[in-house]
Amino acid sequence: MANLQDIGLSAAINILSAIGFLLAFSMLRLQPLNDRVYFPKWYLKGIRSSPTHNRAFASKFVNLDFRTYIKFWTWMHAALRMPEPELIDHAGLDSAMYVRIYLLGLKIFIPITALAFGVLIPINWTGKTLGNIKDINHITFDKVDKLSISNVPSGSNRFWAHILMAYVFTGWTYYVLYNEYKIIANKRLHFLASEGRRPDHFTVLVRNVPPDPDESVSEHVEHFFCVNHRDQYLTHQIVYNANLLASIVEKKKKLLNWLTYYQNKFERNPSTRPTIKTGVWGLCGTPVDAIDRYESELKCLSEEEDVEREKVLSDPNAVIPAAFVSFRTRWGAAICAQTQQTSNPTIWLTEWAPEPRDIYWSNLAIPYVSLSIRRLLMAVALFFLIFFFMIPITFVQSLANIDGIVKVFPFIRPLMEMSIIKSFIQGFLPGIALKIFLIILPSILMTMSKIEGLTSLSNLERRSAGKYYFFILVNVFLGSVITGSALDQLQAFLNQSPSKIPKTLGVAIPRRANFFITYTMVDGWSGVAAEIVRLSPLVMFHIQNAFFVKTDRDREKAMDAGSLDFASSEPRIQLYFLLGLVYAAVTPILLPFIIVFFAFSYIVYRHQIINVYDQKYESGARFWPDVHRHIIICMLISQVLLFGLLSAKEASHSTPFLIALPVLTIWFHRFCKGRFESAFTKFPIQDAMVKDTLELATEPRLNLKAYLQDAYVHPVFKGEEIAKEEEEEAYMDELVENSPLVPTKRSSVKDSSQHGGSSQGTTPDRSHDMHQA
Amino acid sequence: MANLQDIGLSAAINILSAIGFLLAFSMLRLQPLNDRVYFPKWYLKGIRSSPTHNRAFASKFVNLDFRTYIKFWTWMHAALRMPEPELIDHAGLDSAMYVRIYLLGLKIFIPITALAFGVLIPINWTGKTLGNIKDINHITFDKVDKLSISNVPSGSNRFWAHILMAYVFTGWTYYVLYNEYKIIANKRLHFLASEGRRPDHFTVLVRNVPPDPDESVSEHVEHFFCVNHRDQYLTHQIVYNANLLASIVEKKKKLLNWLTYYQNKFERNPSTRPTIKTGVWGLCGTPVDAIDRYESELKCLSEEEDVEREKVLSDPNAVIPAAFVSFRTRWGAAICAQTQQTSNPTIWLTEWAPEPRDIYWSNLAIPYVSLSIRRLLMAVALFFLIFFFMIPITFVQSLANIDGIVKVFPFIRPLMEMSIIKSFIQGFLPGIALKIFLIILPSILMTMSKIEGLTSLSNLERRSAGKYYFFILVNVFLGSVITGSALDQLQAFLNQSPSKIPKTLGVAIPRRANFFITYTMVDGWSGVAAEIVRLSPLVMFHIQNAFFVKTDRDREKAMDAGSLDFASSEPRIQLYFLLGLVYAAVTPILLPFIIVFFAFSYIVYRHQIINVYDQKYESGARFWPDVHRHIIICMLISQVLLFGLLSAKEASHSTPFLIALPVLTIWFHRFCKGRFESAFTKFPIQDAMVKDTLELATEPRLNLKAYLQDAYVHPVFKGEEIAKEEEEEAYMDELVENSPLVPTKRSSVKDSSQHGGSSQGTTPDRSHDMHQA
């Protein structure tokens, strides 16, 4: 058991490493060379242009203004300064509401911590059990444990205080959760009401169009909606199965990248034309001219693409039985999306169309029965993944020993016989399989969600987050409380009485407090600090910049703005909610660490969404019901564990009073669900009517059909036009621009428009620094 | 453990009692005097009139045609002869689909029985375990047990057969359930599509109309729907809080009954006017003239009623915030019912209006938060009711001993000291509290459902059925398998490991087969036979006929047609599904008993719905998803128990193959739910459009507003008009009719119209018998 010194040491290390990361960030972000890594959002918005222009040569790459270094904490202030309405405007509702999860953590835990320190810690401290036990068991209990519930003697009346506090904490959490749900529902409604015209307001995604022997899918859709939504139907857009075409386009893009690379290489060193080898991975085979080869390959692929495009557009079998149906009014679309069309609920399924960039095109054609079977399979797979994931990893570990490796690659035997390398590999290999698994786990879960057949990216992310949440619950939380694999736990639980399980867990809870404090510091503090440095995008950007970038446009492409990865980051936040709720009544000393995590994360992620992340889609905080539900599950777990702990402490006269808590929590969840959830899933008739009426008054002559015509076209068909435009523009750019360091016409236009952009009220943080300088 | 002789004896007794009931029924139903008890439905339909008219005096009361007695089984034939479409037409879809539950039982269990007898019984019979055990334990196992799974030795490979059969049985059950769901969904859709215009097609129930300071509820509703369903809104009907008025009307009806009784008494014996006493229950006090007293009381009440009626109609506070909103088309109503109106999901709640006679008026005004709290309280109450219902009963039993009674009523002490009476009461009292509880249990559950705030009778019945189902599961099934109260079980289960619970239960299952065979015969066979005799309505009818009836109209009122009591009878059927599914793979000898129950019930209830029951409302088989779900739960229980049994039998290499069964069952349930449930909960747009178009073509000048004007008026306001009409008619009747045994003008009109009625194709069973005579 760790003692205070250990925790202090760990805290010191982690605080130092966090400060290290922050300092690195403060230095790196001031370098003009890294500007696109740390402020990509402003570039993507067109408000900021390369600081490398219009400067003295040295200051193009290194910031020589030392005064800016002194004020290295200004970014924190800047991150917090932007008011929320502006933030929603700037980064979208999704991002703005996402950082509110951290704020929610602060709102819940700061008062709870104050109360727990004021009431529970004195009660625990004066409990004096551990002092007595020490003499018997020869275990040295530390001050941390004296502050926890372990210090209260069994059967003591002091537990009444813990039970009372559990109710107070729960009540406070309800209050905060309820208010937050209400606020976010209102913000969502306000956001939806105030945003401009969007194609998805008028459009409904229709799936499982039944086959008709006499009509094509398009005719069938048109006739059906003309009959059943006579006054409202406007137009529709059929969906092509363009998955093959999309893969060709993808491949072409990759080849184009390499072509650019070799062209750049040739430009820099015009004396020798670059060559590549034709064999596996370009490692062996005869060398050929790289540029020629890629050009010819590209030509081939372009032809293939044209053929495929032609085929998709002309082949009636390439039309999948789904369509985007648009209506004259939002009212008509709201009605069609919420009602059932026919008596057979597996055909003519209607739902709100996701916004065009949110659609996951590959899944639009899955029929009902197949969907149902896919869900079953994925549920079973998830169960096995959570409880049996250690089995294949152990198997891989058993294979990946040195003898095995030497057998496959005999030529590395001499290397292996060096004792340092040998011991390094022996220590390293077993861990690496698990580490790799944990890194790719979110991708595995996302693939599973994709197999389930969801049709929008936002849905996919939410679904994956749910899976990851359960994985973390079982394997990180429970796995740490009762050390052992999930499989062992499952076995142990099945053979234990249901009333004993919370007891077993409850008893283990206070003992693991130190572990979770350390975990919070390593994963929470240092992890978040590492996030802001953006090490991997930083490296990648400079590599791309060095080899692939020719024009500003290329540089823009090389920027990896990234985005909030809801599917993997939300479940990780939930772990801290769980820890906070579980330990609030048990070991309150853990709470300040959680609060630091939430506060620090709030600042960091607010900075990131302002300056860095570029969301792929905007769902209007559609994820909040999931966040709420996950916190409710955390509350339930904490209540059951407290119940188990107290019953193990033989507080038999007071413990039964805890039974009401989980019942109340479930009821609270159902209440909130009924009260708010529909704001996230349905679009009310009244709001649709209001917007329609307003639009009719302001734009009576709007040609809606033209507006909607191409809104829901598969990106590969859209891509064609955009790509052509881009190519032309790129050609123009090339004509104007000779050196990548001289401003082009286009970016100087952007420069002048920057002030217009800033006058909107969005102040990019760097320009602020520069003005000070 | 019962042996074959015991079961044979029990079977003989029950078969004899069942035959006795049937014979009694065959005799009683042929007596013209009982005609209204056994064929009320035909009277209510106006197709049949009193057989006591136009006959020789003796044959008015007793059927003297002995040939009809010989063919006493003809009713069975008649019950089965009516084809289903005619049955739906005659008795409604609810009733026709209700008897299909019995048919479903036959469809599931006849093939399963054949298979089980062909495969499992030979395997069990040759198992030879029990023969060996007998010598050791000195327990005589009977042939019944030799046919059960108990006879297979532990760890035998023969269990593979049981597992295989479990899969076959499950597969077959899926197949039958799926088909049945499909058939019933189609019948429902066909029924809805083919029925004529009904007010509820056009009407939506709007609840939680928000208060408005400037407008009345009526104006507010009108404005809201005029704006948001501009083209569709037609009219609306506000709802008055007429609960007090309804209770006055009810009281008035009761007084009127007594008045009639004393008037009859006076007419028969005109020499003395009847008197009553004014004290408690008419037992003490001064005697007054009964007719005068009731007449004056009635006059008082009528005045009170008028005042209250006036008050309700004029007081704006008597208007509750709910309304029935009607639309121009079914399409408009379908849309409004299925969509959300405003962004606040707790106001302007819309749902399909139940048909007018299905509405439970008292619950229309409950606000959202109150509803939510009521549900919580009722869920907690149900839990306590199921697991702790024995506590108050034990308490009552402890009070209701002889000493306690004597203390309260000292004057019965001498009576109590007679040893026969004493021992009778001592043996009788403890049981009676439980018996009374079980009799009033459905009413308790119905009251709980009413408190939950459901707005239609059909919903209330379904909800109560769900509660009763869980009560039966826990207290009848599990309580019989493991003898002991539910509370003991709960305690035992909490202290057992989850993997052991199915084992404990599984081991007990084969041992209780004999008990359940006896139960099936007593509760199933004799119970159903007793149902057809209608003892209580028979007695009540003759009592009322003797004292209260003056005119044919009164006689019609005295008929208690009754109705299918879904809330209490459906859960009882489910018990047999559960028994059949659980014992199919364990003790197949139980199956024939279940089959006899289903077959016999099918005939009896088909007869009852044709000739007796008069449904209070028509929900269009809305209950089927509940029936389906309950059977699925039965399947899950049977699968878990089989798993437990086999794992206790140490068939460790084969048992794990059973794990897939519950997973598959849950998936099957979800699949069916997705595939069919919406047919029972939503009204598809297409169907609404088809009916609208048809109606527009056939009745282009329909005045819908006039049609809907009074459809949704509280019955007490409607009752007023009807009551006035009735009073006038009754007065006319009295003028014409001097003796109740002479045909009146009106009933002779009915007589002549009877032939017109029969020519519709509905042949009342008695007239058929009479023609034969």
Image: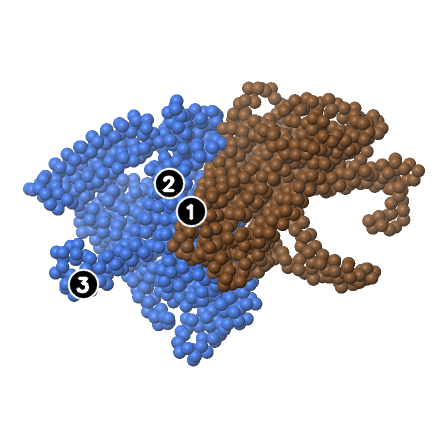
Chain colours: A brown, B blue
Q: Nearer the viewer, residue B279 or A505?
A: A505
Residue B539 relative to residue B679: left or right? left
Q: Residue at x 62, y 44 (%)?
A: A525
Q: Taking B11 as reference, is A528 above or below it?
A: above
Q: Where does the image place residue B510, in percent across and percent down from the top left?
A: 43, 67
Same chain letter for marks 1 and 3 = no
Give the residue type at disc 1: Leu
Q: Where does the image place residue A395, in percent across and percent down from the top left?
A: 68, 60
Label 2 lies in what chain? B
User: Where does label 3 land, which residue?
Assistant: B422
Same chain letter for marks 3 and 2 = yes
Secondary structure beneath dot 1 equals helix
Mark 1–mark 3 Cα distance, whole angstroms, equals: 53 Å
Residue A487 relative to residue B483: left or right? right
Q: Is residue B583 visible?
A: no
Q: Where does the image place residue B318, in percent across and percent down from the top left?
A: 31, 30
User: Where does label 1 land, which residue?
Assistant: A164
User: Where does label 2 land, which residue?
Assistant: B453
Q: Where does the image place residue A469, in percent across and percent down from the top left?
A: 58, 47
